[in-house]
Image (spheres, rainbow, N blue to C red):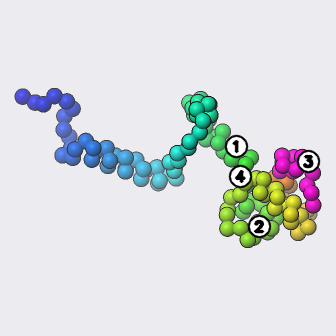
């Protein structure tokens, strides 16, 4: 008489099968450029994130939020010039605004790209109340 339960298709115990499957899944995610992160957030925030995730717009939402709060130095030539001593590739938007303010005398406004001009205008509105103290 056969033992009840699922049929054995592998000689490995179930725990080992699960471990191998998880390793394979993580390797596939790495190849796809995905990274697993874990966040600790309040329950109310987690519930709202779950709603956004279920709508399928979580990545778009996070990208929009990160674009507002994080600046990639290399995307903005004048910022890269004044942040030459920073090893970070990404900095908080507030820190980018502070760099522009502190080093405004070194920035040539005629050489600013349209994208950088938009960034400076946005940062000035958001962190400088419409004024850049230079």
Front position in the image: 117 or 88: 88
Q: Is residue 125 magenta?
A: yes
Quick check: 3 left or right of 123? left
Dot placed on the residue nearer the N-terminal end, 4 or 1: 1
In the image, which disc is placed on residue 70?
Answer: 4
What is the C-alpha distance between the residues marked 4 and 1? 9 Å
Quote the CA–CA distance across marks 3 and 1.
Answer: 21 Å
User: For mark 3, does the 10 Å Cα neighbourhood hold few (<14), some (14 to 19), or many (20 or more) residues?
Assistant: few
Whichever of labels 3 and 1 marks the residue nearer the N terminus, that label is 1
Mark 4 and mark 2 lie on one chain; the one further toward the N terminus is 4
- The question of residue 62 being in magenta is answered with no
- Disc 3 target residue: 130
Q: Which residues are magenta?
A: 122-134
Q: Quadrant of residue 73?
A: bottom right
- Quadrant in which the C terminus appears: bottom right
Q: Which residue is mark 1?
A: 65
Q: Residue furthest bottom?
A: 85
Of residue 45 and residue 100, the one placed in the foreground of this image is 45
Q: What is the CA distance from the residue labelled 4 to the residue labelled 3?
A: 19 Å
Q: Residues within 10 Å of mark 2 (few under 14, many from 20)?
A: some
Q: Position of residue 46 (x, y in %)?
A: 58, 34
Residue 110 found in image quarter: bottom right
- The circle on residue 90 is none
Q: Which sits earlier in the primary sequence, circle 2 or circle 3?
A: 2
- In the figure, is residue 110 to the left or right of 30? right
Q: Is residue 27 visible in this depiction of the protein? A: yes
At 56% from the left edge and 43% from the top edge, which residue is drawn?
A: 39
Displayed quadrant of residue 96: bottom right
| Disc on the earlier residue, 1 or 2 | 1
């Amino acid at each position: 008489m056969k033992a009840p339960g699922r049929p054995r298709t592998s000689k490995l115990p179930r725990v080992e099968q699960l471990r191998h499957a998880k390793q394979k899944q993580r390797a596939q995610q790495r190849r796809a450029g995905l990274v697993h992160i874990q966040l600790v957030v309040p329950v109310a925030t987690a519930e709202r994130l779950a709603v956004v995730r279920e709508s399928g717009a979580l990545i778009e939402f996070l990208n929009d939020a990160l674009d507002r709060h994080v600046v990639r130095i290399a995307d903005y030539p004048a910022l890269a010039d004044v942040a030459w001593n920073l090893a970070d590739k990404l900095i908080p938007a507030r820190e980018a605004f502070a760099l522009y303010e502190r080093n405004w005398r070194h920035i040539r406004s005629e050489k600013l790209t349209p994208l950088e001009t938009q960034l400076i205008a946005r940062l000035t509105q958001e962190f400088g109340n419409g004024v850049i103290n230079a």
